Image: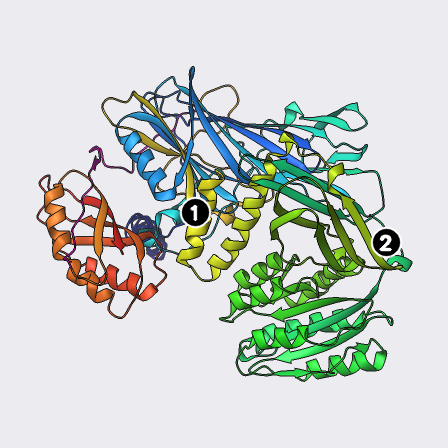
Amino acid sequence: MKRAGFWLLAFCALLSILFAQQSFAQQQEGEDRTLSPYFFVNSNNPDADRLPLKSTKASVNISGVIADVLVTQVYKNDGRNPLEAVYVFPASTRAAVYGMKMTIGKRVIEAKIKKRDEARREYEQARDAGKNASLLEQQRPNVFQMNVANIMPGDEIKVELRYTELLVPTDHVYEFMYPTVVGPRYSNQKASDASYSERWVENPYLHQGELSATTFDIAVEINAGMPIKNLFCSSHKVKAVYENQTMAKVSLDKAEAHGGNRDYILHYRLDGDKIQTGLLLFQGVRENFFVLMTQPPKRITNAGIPGREYIFIVDVSGSMHGFPLNISKKLLSDLIGNLRATDRFNVLLFSGGSSLMAEESLPATKENIQRAVDTIERQQGGGGTELLPALKRALSLKKKDGFARTVIIVTDGYVSVEEEAFDLIRNNLNNANMFAFGIGSSVNRHLIEGMAHVGMGEPFIITKQETAPVQAERFRKMIQSPVLTQVKVRFSGFNAYDVEPLSVPDVLAERPVLVFGKWRGNTSGTVTISGVAGAGRYSESIKVENYKASNDNTALKYLWARHRITLLSDYNKLRNDDKRVKEITELGLKYNLLTAYTSFVAVDNEVRNVNGKWTTVKQPLPLPEGVSDHAVGSPGPYPAAPVAQRGWGVGVMMKSRMSEDKLAVRETEVPEKKGEAQKIRFTDVVSEKGLTSDEISNVLQAQTGDIKKCLAGLKTTGTIKLRFTVNHDGTVKKAEIISGTIANSGFWQCVMDRMKKWAFPATKNKKEVTVTLSIVIS
């Protein structure tokens, strides 16, 4: 009996586990399913759809310090049904994507840059009409998404995109990095609540060690203009062939055909150890552009190092209490304790107010160092976080001649004056270098990384106390050898404008100086770079007439615009602003660049998918090398693609996540009553079959009062795009805001709450109907 009871108990336990797993799977399919990556489900069914992406190849041409990259993606449908392919892939954060085209057989369609919403709408309308179309969107500054619609059985479609970037050397070592795969991103956001721009996170992945069916290739041509030394690839097996001392071709070893699971990294250096300057010029039809680069020598002797002054600004507010402040103490003890006797330093502690160690920086004697460390050790953390007054006070301190000043900010970043801090740092780059340490397990990375961008420095994030010494050593190596301080750039007889950055930081052994700008008139006059070097005052003048404008430098206009967009985007991450969104959008449209608000879309006029049905296939990505299955979790509900196998083909059972009903696209506007202070319009209405445009229009017109109530007390204009699902009985099942330019979360929430109470007529086909629309406030 005991034995029978044991097996009965075990059987019940097994049933409970299976039931729990089934319940969990059902929950994941339902409303509570989180927006997370998942493993693809493989199928041997020969009738299943095959994954379209066959290969990715990058052709790289490096001329001087500019890399121009052509990425070719080949999609082929070996299955029996029309497909829509969705592929998420990475790019360099410095990449300026300026072109795309789609080739179908002998037909070539050049993509056009359009506002993001317009591009997606045009793509979806073409897809629904049965036309070939492709869409390239930026989901993050370094994450892109490609959609290719109506890939018919037997089709091969080639999509090419072009981008350019500036190669910035570190200690005379040039690095070209080509990212190959987007790693899985954890998200606990509900899938039902996610906006469209966040849904790329829900992507299929292969298991650890599995090879992708997509092949990878890359070829690099270098024309350095100077003899190349120490050319090597640290990530892949390559073959390098030198055309001459200044030119080389680098090809990927055939054994690396499935090497798209790790970034491709190529290094090389050039001759010369002096501070080198160079000017690149491009003369356009309406605007002219230039880039000035000042590069320090590779090796710095003690005689070449100017005196150094460090100002430590330390956050001791209430949010730093405990664990974060303990990390700060360890970090600062390491940084201050290792100063040289010839250095000078000061410490400013801040919370609601600030406390300064001395009105003028002190020599780094043992006594002064111990005094500073003891003061920091006594801090417990308390009060507010007034960063801006602390920054202003530190920058106003008297500066000793001949010393390079570096300001080190140590904080968790929990402040509300990010924009003002950015402006202050940006306008004082010629007075001090700025470096930011983010301390704690959940720092304000927008602030830390943003300060690094505008301060031409590096962000340092420390989440564990034991990593503080490593980060301190990394910081020391970066700033211990400033070779040119108090840098100024003066234009004489050369009409430069729209120059970035506004003021120039010190030239460090680890980082060259870059100045972007535009110019008018003739290529004449001089550009003078001055500062303080180890041997004293330094000045070098460049005669502009010695540098000729060249069409080979076309990329300069893209690089200038990309630099400006990056700066605006850093501000916008912190606080969304309609004017900044508009400026980024206009820059993208004017200079033909992919941005968060502009996308590339290519549409063929020929209707090829007559019945209007297709299967959406998400391209599964290989896990980055060294990343385990734990980064993804459990298998997802949606299959995706074949894995490369030896000797036999693999199919995939696909289940379309879209309605079989073809989307009916309509537009309607609801007029507002005359005399209203703010006008409300409903535009770009798109719905599935089941509700007529008149039925939707009548309901929307009746709801303008709801929107007005949400606007009470707000003087704002802009647009928000909504998506909601109408049940078969006319009630609204769920609603979400996809995007918007109105930066007021209270207004967004009010609209969402009221929208869920709207009542539509019962749907004619007894099915749920998804509706998207835009509300325009003017």
Horizontal relation, residue 763 to residue 613: left or right = left
Q: How far from the left and from the top, in percent, is residue 657?
A: 29, 38
Q: Nearer the viewer, residue 301 or 424?
A: 424
Q: Judging from the image, what secondary structure is the residue with disc 2 in?
A: loop
Q: Is any atom of residue 130 visible in this view?
A: yes
Q: What residue is disc 2 on?
A: 300
Residues at marks 2 and 1, CA–CA distance in whole angstroms? 43 Å
Placement of 729 over or under 468, stated as above or below = above
Main SS category, magenta section: loop
Packing grade of label 1 (10 A; few <14, some 14-19, many >=20) is many
How many numbered discs, if any?
2
Q: Nearer the viewer, residue 561 or 339?
A: 561
Disc 1 residue type? Thr
Stretch of the chain drawn in magenta: 650-674
Q: What residue is disc 1 on?
A: 585
Choose top left, top right, bottom left or bottom right for residue 706: bottom left
Quadrant in the picture for the N terminus: bottom left
